[in-house]
Amino acid sequence: MKLLRFLHRVIYKSRIYYMQLIYSYRYYYTKRLALCCDIRCCISYVGQMKTKFPHPVGIVIGIGVKIGSNCMIFQNVTLGTKSLFSSDYPTIGNNVIIGANSIIMGDVEIGNDVTIGAFTLVNRSIPSKAIVVGNPARIIGFKE
């Protein structure tokens, strides 16, 4: 709240200073992602897809992972392959929420509007609008 009030004051005083703050925040956020995560797919690709990282610590995303738009990925999530020399990467749909400490591995497809709970191991495809929890993942319901 204090940050919002500060930025609100800055907007009226100096637009140039405001833009410098925004760009420095983007630089800081990008540096934080680079230092705290292992994102093999390009960070600009993740930014274009409007993927959000509320707590960007310990996130691992393989080079062949395809992420849809408006996804939210929490801390310690791994998106990758089942073995070292495999090229089977997951495909994530639009508006997917992936809970903390979840693992999505192998050649699986996650549909649109899926919610994956915390500590979930996903090793098979998930249909759209499903709510998934457990190890291994099981569908407990669907969104309306």
Image (cartoon, rainbow, N blue to C red):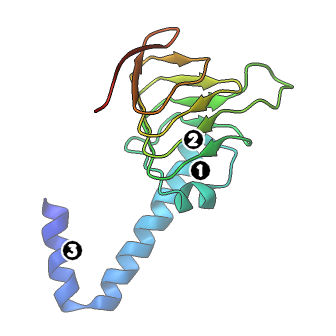
Q: CA distance from mark 2 to mark 1?
A: 6 Å
Proximity of marks 2 and 1: CB atoms separated by less than 8 Å? yes
Q: Which residue has dot 2 on it?
A: 37
Residue found at the very far front of the displayed protein: 144
Q: Which residue has dot 1 on it?
A: 34
Q: CA distance from mark 2 to mark 3?
A: 28 Å
- Residue 37: image quadrant is top right
Residue found at the very far top of the displayed protein: 135
Upstream in sequence: badge 1 or badge 3: 3
Quarter of the figure with the N terminus: bottom left
Please give the name of the residue rendered at 46% of the width and 61% of the height, measured from the top-left corner.
28
> Which of 88 and 126 lies nearest the eye of the viewer?
126
- Residue 6: image quadrant is bottom left
> Which of 73 and 136 lies nearest the eye of the viewer?
136
Q: Which residue has dot 3 on it?
A: 7
What's under tag 3, amino acid-wise?
Leu
Proximity of marks 1 and 3: CB atoms separated by less than 8 Å? no
Residue found at the very far right of the displayed protein: 85
Quarter of the figure with the C terminus: top left
- Vertical relation: 24 (above or below) 122: below
* Residue at disc 3, secondary structure: helix
Q: Position of residue 61 (x, y in %)?
A: 63, 38
Q: Position of residue 89 (x, y in %)?
A: 72, 33
* Residue at disc 1, secondary structure: helix
Upstream in sequence: badge 2 or badge 3: 3
